[in-house]
Amino acid sequence: AQKVTQAQTEISVVEKEDVTLDCVYETRDTTYYLFWYKQPPSGELVFLIRRNSFDEQNEISGRYSWNFQKSTSSFNFTITASQVVDSAVYFCALLTRRAGNNRKLIWGLGTSLAVNP
Amino acid sequence: DAGVTQSPTHLIKTRGQQVTLRCSPKSGHDTVSWYQQALGQGPQFIFQYYEEEERQRGNFPDRFSGHQFPNYSSELNVNALLLGDSALYLCASSLRDTEYEQYFGPGTRLTVT
């Protein structure tokens, strides 16, 4: 079975706090991709990061950082010094590369982040 | 370079009616995927089109059908609308064999009353 679990449904923080969004995935495939998307109230999904299964190097992009650990099947996302504009729903997703054509994105349920001034 | 576009932005329909949503992929992309996102949920994969054929399908009834045109644009059709079909419908485009680079459109918000 392939599955993405985002255990945190809602998180509320005060501006400038650091916040970590958790993502745990399940797959039997050895080759796969993991994603994080941001969905602001406007509805459009904004791509944040893609990581393939062979690259466990953590990544930092400005105030955003990602921690990929295959040993725990986790791909967590941290926002440092959060801002009100970070308020959105964040989705973690998994894309596997099975034989055949079954290559679709599997999504978590999302974490709604509210950053309060 | 235009990104993925979808039309209309919003739509209100009545139960039992039929609806057609449209998607134009990002320039150079040949594969279109459709997703349904109910309120408070993650996107659910409906189907994917490549070379004008449905290549993959999610767990959606036959009321959901689609089409891809020679210019790679795509339509999603839903027949016999139910209240539960109310959702944001997202279109994503990519190149065949590079589904890890999917670009999403702004979505069409469908309300069924």
Image (tube, grey):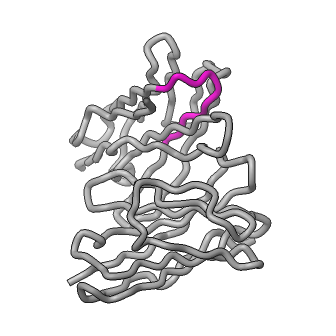
> Number of callouts in the render?
0
Query: Is residue B68 found left or right of A76 in the rendered image?
Result: right
Give the camera-side residue of A86 and B16: B16
Give the camera-side residue of B60 and A105: B60
Residue at the image point whose x is 58% and y is 22% from the top: A58
Q: Is residue B110 above or below residue A71?
A: below
Magenta residues (range): A27-36
x and y, in percent, of residue A28 in the image = 52, 22
Residue at the image point whose x is 39% and y is 26% from the top: A24
Quadrant in which the C terminus of chain B is drawn: bottom left
Residue at the image point whose x is 51% and y is 28% from the top: A66
x and y, in percent, of residue B46 in the image = 47, 60
Query: Is residue A97 found left or right of A36 in the rendered image?
Result: right
x and y, in percent, of residue A81 in the image = 38, 36
Q: Is residue A29 magenta?
A: yes
Which image quadrant for residue A56?
top right
Residue at the image point whose x is 60% and y is 38% from the top: A50
Q: Is residue B109 above or below residue B20?
A: above
Name, please, the residue furthest toward the right.
B28
Which image quadrant for residue B84?
bottom left
Give the camera-side residue of B55 and B44: B55
Q: Is residue A52 above or below residue A47?
A: above
Quadrant in which the N terminus of chain B is drawn: bottom right
Q: Is residue B44 above or below residue A106?
A: below
x and y, in percent, of residue B64 in the image = 44, 71
Q: Is residue A68 magenta?
A: no
Give the camera-side residue of A116 and A99: A99
Name, please, the residue furthest toward the top.
A71
Query: Is residue B112 found left or right of B45 in the rendered image?
Result: left
